[in-house]
Structures are given as C-alpha cells and as structure tokens.
Amino acid sequence: MVNTILKEADLFCPNSVRINFTIYQQNLNNYLSTVTADGTASVSFYNLGSTDENDNSFDGKLYQKGSLQVESNAHIARTAASTYKLYIAAYLMNQKLKGNFSWTTENVDGFSRMIINSDNDFSEAQVDKYGASELSSFGEKQGWYSSVFQEGQATQTTSYSLQLLLEDLATGSGVFKNASDQAKILTWMGQQNYRTGIPTGAAEAKSGTTVQDKVGFLDDTNNDAAIVTLPNGQRYILVIMTNGHNQSNLSGFPRIAEIAKNVQNIVYGSDAGTKLVDYSKK
C-alpha cells in the first residue's frame, strides 16, 4: 500500500515548462507500488528541502521541506538487522542529554565502530545493559515503532519509523538536538563501509551526491536507511528494506541501489515532473 503526503504546487520552470507537483507524486507512487508489489520490500521517501534555508531558486521553492512524502509497505514490521543500531544511537543521545552518557575513549571507539563497521559488540552491550523493554519503550515515546527490541527475538522495525528517526537526526531535533553530537553521528554515517546500496544508486543518478546512511543485513534481509544530499544542496530521506529474491548477506544491495537511483531520478532528475510514466509496464 502506498501513502502520500504532499503540498500542492503548480509552477513554471525557468525554461517555461509547466510543472505540476502532483506528477512527482503520481510517478513515485506508481514506481514504489511496482517495486514493492511482491511484498518483499518497504520504501519510505521524505524530502528535507535545501541545506540553505534562504534558497530562493526554483528548486528551493519547489522542494520545500515536507513537500513530498511517499511510502509503500512502510508500516509493515520487518527484520531490522543492523539498522536497529540507529535506535541505540538515539537512546544513548537521550542518555547523554540526561548526563548519563559521555564520549569517553571507550564509547567513541565502540559507537564509531557500531556505525562505520556495523560491529555488534557495542550495540549488544547496550541492549544487555538497558534491556529490550526499556529500549523499545523509549522508541515508542518518540513516536517510533514500539517493538524494535523484544527478548529472544530478532529486532524489527518499519521503514516509516526509520524515516522519522532520520528526520530528527537530519534536522537536529529531539534527542539529536546537540549539534556536536549530531555532526559526529552524521560524519560516521558518511564513512560507513557498506556503500553498494543507496550511496551507489544516488551517485549513479547524480554524480557528486553524498549519502549518510546505516545499513543492515541478516540472512535474506538487506536494508539501507539514508540521508541523501544532492550537489545543489537538496536533501531527502530514503529508507529501503528488502528480503527474498534469493538474496543473502550483501547480495540484495544492488537491488536497493537500483530503487534508489530510480527514486532520485523520478523526484530530482532533469525531466522530473514533466510527464506521467507508467512504471508497471517497464
């Protein structure tokens, strides 16, 4: 099921080509419906607007923050794999705001490896220390998926929940309101090692695009949750969760890259918004 939130806009490009923002919505709806139709994928897209709050360019006016949110299967709980480490990061930043966590040498080492290498020792130690119930309760209070952590079970989440968390991180809101801590985590996400998913697809769509993301892979699950910045400063959140298709370990990331490339082209490509496309026939 695809859900969409958008602000209507009927604009003129500099070259006088008339653009109706509903075309962006319809094309993205159609595409995401197609790639999630078999039930083995969830996708959430949310545009963050420009890094320049005073951007008065055509793109700046068109892509205002929150003007387009499109999702498909986004509220279906799936295996989180290592994307659950974003929830650990959020919990620890809340602890830091309370004065219960600090950037000791040990914590910097463990936290950075958790994000960059996706190492498990630090995150598993936090689960053991605080408990699954406490961690899930914290997430529920933030308005995120309420049962990420369950005793004796693999972590679960939804693409929409990861989108909401990334929105807080990208905008320095909620538990990520400390600017220094926010920058530290985003830097590590920009350095994470597994870049054949959204980072590859976004760069193929537009050279110079940068991605700060956290991946997860377990058995036939391959996930990627990203904050994407285009060369012109436009930013968006994209979360893609996949399983099936005989994928294992990292073998599903080319599938994620393809979805990411197409999503970016549909919303930000040179001919985006100029015509309706039926992706179900492609």
Image: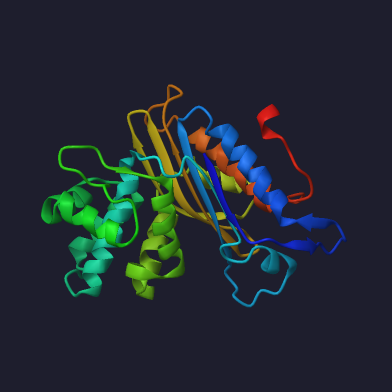
Residue 120: x, y in percent? 23, 45
Q: Residue 189: image x %, image y %?
A: 40, 56
Viewer-nearest residue: 200 or 90 = 90
* Residue reaching furthest to the right: 16
Q: Residue furthest left?
A: 129
Q: Position of residue 49 (x, y in %)?
A: 59, 65
Residue 206 in view: no
Q: Nearer the viewer, residue 208 or 125?
A: 125
As drawn, 153 above or below 145: above
Residue at the image position 63 percent from the left and 44 percent from the top:
28
Total tally of numbered discs in the picture = 0
The picture quadrant where one finds residue 275 is top right
> Left or right: where does residue 50 sit relative to residue 166?
right
Q: Residue at x 71, y 56 (%)?
A: 21
Q: Up-down: is 181 above or below 47?
A: below
Front in this rendered view, residue 171 or 106: 171
State which quarter of the image contains the C terminus: top right
Residue 156: quarter of image: top left
* Residue 197: % across, % down: 49, 41
Q: Left of 14 or right of it: where is 120?
A: left
The residue located at (15%, 38%) in the rendering is 152
Work out whether residue 158 can be spotted.
yes
216 relative position to 170: left or right: left
At x 14%, y 52%, the residue is 131
Q: How is the image coloured?
A: rainbow
Residue lying farthest bottom? 54
Residue situated in front as seen by the camera: 116 or 236: 236
